[in-house]
Image (cartoon, rainbow, N blue to C red):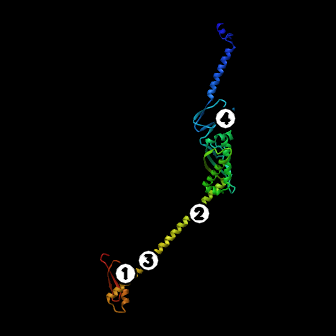
Amino acid sequence: MENEDRYQFNPQFGLLGYAIIIIGVLIAVFAAVFFLTMWVNVPVGSAVVMVDPLAGTISQPVIGPTFATKAPWVNAVQIKISVDTLKIWGDGTDRTADFPTVKSFSEDQLEMDVDMMIRWRLDTTKLKQLYENLPQKNWKNDVIASIAREQVRIVTKDFSTIETIEQREVVAQAIGDAIWNKLSVSAPLTSAIIDFEFELRNIGYPAKYTSAIEDKLVAEQQKIQADFNKQIIIINATANAERVTIAAAANANATVIEATATREAIELVLAAAGVDPGNETRLAELYLVVQTLQRIAPDIDMLIMAPDGTPILLPSPSS
């Protein structure tokens, strides 16, 4: 009974005492909640704007990494200010992409699949105005992505299909410039995009067109090879003709030289022999015969002329 009486209402304490205790507990809880909710962690690569619904104000951004303080009723909105990316490729099932590839047409009305990636950062001095324009923070998916797809379709219609293949860098530069120019003047973005980069990952073509291009390339390679082989044949033929010409010229020169030498030798023989006029022809004939026999029989050491003018060859003992 004594223990039960201990926990029974004590009229002497009064309602005021219990009220003071309850109020004290509430104040302590409120103070704890207030203290815990007034601190905001702002991590690296982020900024925070404070939205005060009571005052109807939006603060300038607080740039991380840091801690910020606020009243419990103020909403701390975090905004990413590190490099952000927009990935556009695939058929819509690729989880690494934000959006599927852009379907566009070339100047000659061929449908193409354009894959691309865009990188950028937000200018911290424009964050307040950007959030005021787009409080849903949907600038990436609803504004930048829309502008990118639109500009791809506008630019590619000015290039033929062959140009998109042969002038890929020019096409990429044109698309990137068009997207950047439109982002720079977009009213919702308030020029908040900086450090813009564009990457044209790929341009896909229909399978039939790709096959036709491959066949054309093969045919061109075969033509190049045929032209090369033709040039080789022409070069070889020219070289052979030049070689024959040079050889013929050399033989002709040799013949002329030999004939000149023979004539001079005969003249010397005739002068040394002191032959009578009218016998020069016979002596010249004998000289030529000797020279000819020497060429066809190099091992002959002695030549004796018979009375009738017939040459008799005497070979050397060793032969």
Of pointers 4 and 1, the one earlier in the residue sequence: 4
Q: CA distance from mark 2 to mark 3?
A: 42 Å
* Residue 224 seen in render: yes
Depth check: give the residue in front, 126 or 121. 126
Front label number (1 vs 2): 2
Give the quadrant of residue 267.
bottom left
* Position in image of residue 62 (x %, y %): 61, 36
The extreme top residue here reads 1
Q: Disc 3 marks which residue?
A: 251
Q: CA distance from mark 4 to mark 1?
A: 125 Å
Front label number (2 vs 3): 2
* Position in image of residue 7 (x %, y %): 66, 11
As displayed, is residue 306 above or below residue 99? Answer: below
* Position in image of residue 17 (x %, y %): 67, 14
Decide: marks 1, 2 in contact (CB < 8 A)?
Answer: no
* Position in image of residue 71 (x %, y %): 64, 30
Give the quadrant of residue 279.
bottom left
Q: Quadrant of the C terminus?
A: bottom left
Q: Amino acid at mark 4?
A: Val
Q: Amino acid at mark 1?
A: Leu
Of pointers 2 and 3, the one earlier in the residue sequence: 2
Front label number (4 vs 3): 4
Q: Amino acid at mark 3?
A: Asn
| Local SS, label 3 | helix
Q: CA distance from mark 2 to mark 4?
A: 71 Å
Q: Amino acid at mark 2?
A: Lys
Q: Is residue 258 left or right of residue 210?
A: left
Decide: marks 2, 4 in contact (CB < 8 A)?
Answer: no
Q: Which mark is residue 293?
A: 1
